[in-house]
């Protein structure tokens, strides 16, 4: 992935799973499709976002979404079905990520 995009901000080995975490500031449509195909789910952190296209793109790709319980995601994410809504705190996001990793229903 780093070779595909020259502006990779961070590549870090995760302590929780045997995986790498990449933070990309932007990407092409093709890269977005590849990322959504390869991911377990989408972590969407903006609060009070009016619409939020990211969660819709993830769900259209069959990927669950973890988002703040405010704004547009409250109208598009069905808790326990298409993802999880949580308070905007690190512990709430961590809890939702843990639930996603063990949820058989939400795995693609």
Image: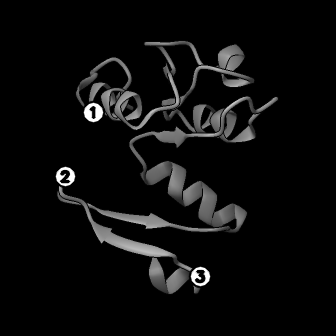
Q: How is the image coloured?
A: one colour
The local crowd at label 2, few if under 14, some if 14 to 19, many if 20 or more residues have their Cα within 10 Å, is few
Image position of 82 (left or right of 92): right
Residue at 52% x, 57% y is 35
How many marks are shown on the rendered structure? 3
User: Which callout, 2 or 1, points at the residue further toward the start of the chain?
Assistant: 2
Q: Nearer the viewer, residue 61 or 75?
A: 75
> Residue 97 location, x and y as percent?
34, 34
Task: Kindly state the secondary structure of the residue where label 2 is placed.
Answer: loop
The earlier-in-sequence mark between 3 and 2 is 3
Q: Which residue is disc 3 drawn over? A: 7
Q: Secondary structure at mark 3?
A: loop
- Residue that lies at the very extreme toward the right in this rendered image: 50
Name the residue: 58% across, 86% down.
Answer: 6
| Residue located at (62% from left, 58% from top) | 32
**Real-space Cα distance between discs 3 and 2?**
24 Å
**Could you give the CA–CA distance between mark 2 and mark 1, rounded to whole angstroms?**
10 Å
Q: Which residue is mark 2?
A: 17
Determine contact: label 2, label 1, CB under 8 Å: yes
Mark 1 packing: few (<14 Cα in 10 Å), some, or many (20+)? few
Query: Which labelled disc corresponds to residue 101?
Result: 1
**Front-lying residue, 81 or 52:** 52
Where, quadrant-wise, is the N terminus in this rendering?
Answer: bottom left
Q: Considering only vertical position in the picture, is 105 above or below 31?
A: above
**Quarter holding the C terminus?**
top left
Q: Please report whichever mark, 1 or 3, sits nearer to the chain's N-terminal start.
A: 3
Q: Is residue 33 above or below residue 2?
A: above
Q: Quote the CA–CA distance across marks 1 and 3.
A: 28 Å
Could you tell me which residue is drawn at 57 percent across and 39 percent down? 44
Q: Nearer the viewer, mark 1 or mark 3?
A: 3
- Which of 23/34 is in front? 23
């Amino acid at each position: 992935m780093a070779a595909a995009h020259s502006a990779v901000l961070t590549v870090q080995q995760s302590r929780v799973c045997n995986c790498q975490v990449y933070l990309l500031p932007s990407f092409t449509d093709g890269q977005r499709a590849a990322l959504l195909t390869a991911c377990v789910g989408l972590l969407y952190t903006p609060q009070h976002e009016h619409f939020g296209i990211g969660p819709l793109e993830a769900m259209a790709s069959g990927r669950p979404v973890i988002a703040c319980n405010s704004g547009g995601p409250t109208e598009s994410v069905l808790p326990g079905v298409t993802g999880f809504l949580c308070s905007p705190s690190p512990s709430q996001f961590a809890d939702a990520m843990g639930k996603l990793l063990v949820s058989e229903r939400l795995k693609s």
